[in-house]
Image (spheres, grey):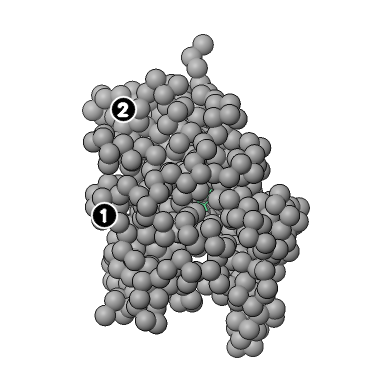
């Protein structure tokens, strides 16, 4: 029988995260204070984030950052995650390519997001923080953080966009099961929420407003810090456990990837699977290709512009140098909620600019076609976000078939879709559609970022 799963024991959980900032040839441009346009120092971030995360955010020096033992112990609940050879998907495609996937859906939260949630909760606890807060749209990050907070004895308050709170009751139940307090946003508990409700009592909420509420709570409550589940450098750093394990597992399989693929929202799972391989391109001249799969309806890497922009809709964050569609960008309501973000993380943006990675866009219907084929061949129902990585993988595997070349492709299965079955229902009933966005419309939104770069 052919070996399908490549497993590592708990003792092989990485002992340090890989810090891409230390090895990339061109360092990211500085993060700026929007009022003064001065480069931020870690201390400037202390009022919002816990100190260790703020330090990691701007660390361009240390290639390896040790993973604290208590975090490794919590990782051991679900790590090392399996690396799987997708023989049945290969057979269904008739491709000579070897397809592998790293299965991050086995975490208690059902996605890779827990890799950073545990680290952030631990550092908060270490610093004497008692409460952490965040916003959540679809509920993936909120679910991961709720569990991580419980594990490290912290109170967790999640502001959930009101429309999702009502439409995704199971994600809310998951967060409550793990012990978090969930508030539909906008709420009357903050100034930001009150202002919005006063202006429009029926406001259905937005991620921008939920962020404002969470940050307001963090800065106005003693011993309370804000956390974020993607985009930021320290979040991407924590995710490198994915690729570090995968590197060892590919060795067990006796192969090295020609192509590594991940879906792309803010870039955390992409960084996680790619950086440990990309460092060999940078340091040893390996030629692996790295492909980010983004939704066609939110194409920041394929059609966005590299410039300074706010990280959030409300304009509360520092200015980040990144590929962006403009912070005013209103993504279509695709089912891959985790990919509906206007910008790309700062490190990935620089790597993209410097030619170390590429990006493709995937239409919503193509992503679900791919997800259903994957479920039927490999037995895991993928998250709508992960379906984008699968679609991009299938495209590359079919190219291999065309040219008769058996490349080795590795993709990250960022999460499972068991709480997203309503999206699959829409796909099967024929109600799902694609969303195209014209250049004209895109340019209109990008202007909101252009205005900040004068
Ligand atoms: C949040 C999420 C994503 C997108 O976020 P990244 O930071 O780009 O990784 C992808 N897949 C799943 C399952 C998610 O929950």
Disc 2 designates what residue? 407
Few, some or many C-alpha atoms within 10 Å of disc 1 (few <14, some 14-19, many ≥20)? few
Q: Is residue 79 above or below residue 355?
A: above
Instruction: Report the side of 413 relative to 38 (left or right).
Output: right
As rendered, which of 276 and 383 lies closer to the eye?
276
Residue at 40% from the left image edge and 49% from the top image edge: 62
Q: Secondary structure at mark 2?
A: loop
Q: Is residue 103 above or below residue 119?
A: above
Instruction: Report the side of 274 relative to 50 (left or right).
Output: left
How many numbered marks are there?
2
Instruction: Report the side of 342 relative to 374 (left or right).
Output: left
Q: Percent position (x, y) of residue 223?
A: 67, 69
Taking the view exactly as shown, the residue that stands out farthest to the bottom is 199
Do the numbered discs 2 and 1 sit on residues whose CB atoms are within 8 Å?
Answer: no
Residue at 27% from the left image edge and 46% from the top image edge: 356
Disc 1 designates what residue? 26
Q: Quadrant of the C terminus?
A: bottom left
Disc 2 from disc 1: Cα separation: 30 Å
Q: Percent position (x, y) of residue 42?
A: 46, 66
**N-term mark: 2 or 1:** 1
């Amino acid at each position: 029988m052919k070996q399908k799963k490549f497993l590592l024991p708990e003792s092989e959980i990485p002992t340090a995260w890989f810090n891409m900032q230390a090895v990339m040839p061109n360092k990211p441009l500085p993060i700026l204070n929007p009022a003064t346009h001065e480069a931020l120092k870690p201390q400037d971030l202390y009022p919002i984030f816990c100190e260790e995360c703020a330090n990691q955010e701007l660390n361009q020096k240390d290639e390896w950052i040790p993973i604290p033992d208590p975090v490794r112990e919590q990782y051991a609940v679900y790590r090392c995650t399996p690396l799987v050879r997708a023989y049945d998907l290969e057979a269904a495609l008739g491709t000579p390519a070897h397809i592998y996937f790293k299965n991050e859906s086995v975490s208690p939260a059902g996605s890779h997001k827990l890799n950073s949630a545990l680290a952030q909760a631990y550092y908060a606890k270490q610093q004497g923080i008692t409460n952490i807060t965040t916003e959540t749209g679809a509920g993936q990050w909120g679910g991961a953080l709720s569990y991580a907070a419980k594990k490290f004895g912290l109170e967790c308050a999640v502001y959930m966009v009101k429309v999702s709170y009502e439409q995704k009751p199971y994600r809310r139940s998951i967060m409550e099961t793990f012990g978090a307090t969930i508030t539909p946003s906008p709420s009357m508990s903050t100034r930001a929420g009150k202002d919005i409700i006063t202006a429009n009592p029926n406001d259905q909420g937005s991620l921008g407003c939920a962020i404002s509420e969470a940050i307001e709570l963090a800065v106005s409550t003693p011993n309370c810090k804000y956390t974020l589940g993607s985009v930021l450098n320290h979040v991407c750093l924590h995710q490198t456990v994915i690729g570090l394990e995968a590197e060892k597992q590919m060795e067990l399989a006796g192969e090295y990837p020609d192509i590594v693929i991940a879906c792309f929202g803010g870039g955390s799972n992409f960084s996680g699977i790619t950086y440990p391989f990309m460092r060999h391109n940078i340091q040893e001249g390996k030629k692996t290709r790295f492909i980010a799969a983004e939704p066609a309806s939110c194409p920041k890497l394929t059609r966005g512009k590299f410039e300074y922009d706010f990280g959030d809709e409300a304009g509360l964050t520092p200015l980040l140098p990144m590929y962006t569609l403009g912070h005013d960008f209103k993504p279509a309501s695709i089912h891959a909620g985790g990919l509906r973000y206007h910008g790309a993380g700062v490190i990935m943006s620089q790597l993209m600019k410097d030619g170390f990675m590429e990006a493709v866009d995937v239409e919503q219907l193509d992503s679900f076609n791919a997800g259903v084929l994957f479920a039927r061949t490999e037995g895991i129902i993928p998250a709508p976000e992960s379906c984008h990585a699968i679609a991009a993988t299938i495209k590359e595997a079919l190219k291999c078939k065309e040219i008769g070349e058996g490349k080795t492709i590795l993709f990250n299965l960022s999460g499972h879709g068991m709480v997203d079955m309503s999206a699959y229902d829409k796909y099967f009933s024929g109600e799902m559609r694609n969303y195209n966005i014209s250049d004209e419309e895109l340019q209109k939104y990008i202007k909101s970022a252009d205005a900040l770069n004068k």
